[in-house]
Amino acid sequence: MQSFPNAGGGAIVEAMAARIVENRAYLSEIDGKIGDGDHGVNMAKGFGMAAERLAGQDATLSQAMAQLGDVLMGEIGGSMGPLYGMTFTEFAEAIEGQDAIDAALFSAMLHKGLEGVQSIGSAQVGDKTLLDTFVPAVDAFDAATGEGRSFADALDALVAAAERGRDSTVDLVAKVGRASRLGERSRGVLDAGATSCAMILGTLAEGAKARLA
C-alpha cells in the first residue's frame, strides 16, 4: 500500500508558499475585479512568513502545517486568513504523530480541513468561493480510492477536479462576501479564493505524489 512519510514533509508547505508568493500579483489582480484586490498580498504575506520560520527546520508535514495555520490565523487580515488558517490547523491535527500517510489518512486530513472551513462560514458549493475547488477535489480523491485506484492516481484525480472547480467559478454569481454585492456583475471572472485553493491543493498533491513509496 502506497504512503509517504510525515518526516521531511515541511518541504511541501515551503513549496506551497513559494507558489503563492510567485502568484501574488495574479491572485490580487483576479481579486481586484470583484473584491478588495488584496488576496494575493495577504496570502503571500502569510505563506511567506511561515516559510521563513520553517527554513532550515526540516519540519514534518504536520509541524509545517501547524506553523502555517498559526500564522494565517493570528497574523493575517482579511477573510482568507482565518479560513485557510483553520484548514491547515485541522490538516495538521489529522496527521500529527503519524509516521506514514496513506490514502485513507490523506482523505481524513482533507475532510478535517474542509470541515474546518465549513464551520466558519455559510458558503456552499456554487456560491463562488474556495469551496467550489475544495469540495469537488476531496470528492474526486475519495471516488478514485473507492474505485480501487492507487494513491498516485487519486492525487491526480484530486488535482484535475480542483482545476475544474476553479474554472467553474467563472460562470458563477458570488453569493457571499464582498463580491456578492455585485450580483450578476460578479459573473465572468475567476474567484480568487478558488484559484489559490487550486494552487494549494495542486502543490500538496504534487509533493505527496513525489514522496510515495
Image (tube, grey):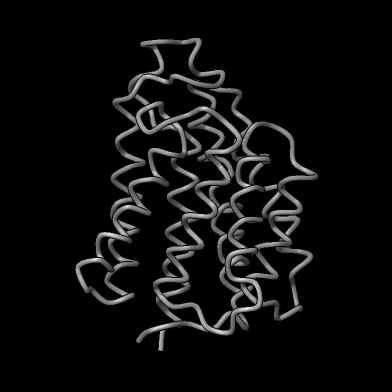
Question: Is 199 above or below relative to 36?
Answer: below
Residue 147 picture location, percent across and down: 19, 68
Name the foreground residue: 109 vs 203. Answer: 109
Question: Is 38 above or below relative to 105?
Answer: above
- Residue at (70% x, 55% y) in the render: 48
Left or right: 106 as drawn, with respect to 39: left
- Residue at (50% x, 45% y) in the render: 196
Q: Quadrant of the N terminus?
A: bottom left
Question: Is 29 above or below relative to 133?
Answer: above
Name the foreground residue: 181 vs 87. Answer: 87
Q: Quadrant of the C terminus?
A: bottom left
Name the foreground residue: 41 vs 169. Answer: 169
Residue 85 picture location, percent across and down: 66, 48
Name the foreground residue: 203 vs 110. Answer: 110
Left or right: 60 as drawn, with respect to 157: right
- Residue at (41% x, 17% y) in the render: 186
Residue 174 picture location, percent across and down: 42, 20
Residue 46 picture location, percent across and down: 71, 49
Left or right: 24 as drawn, with respect to 156: right
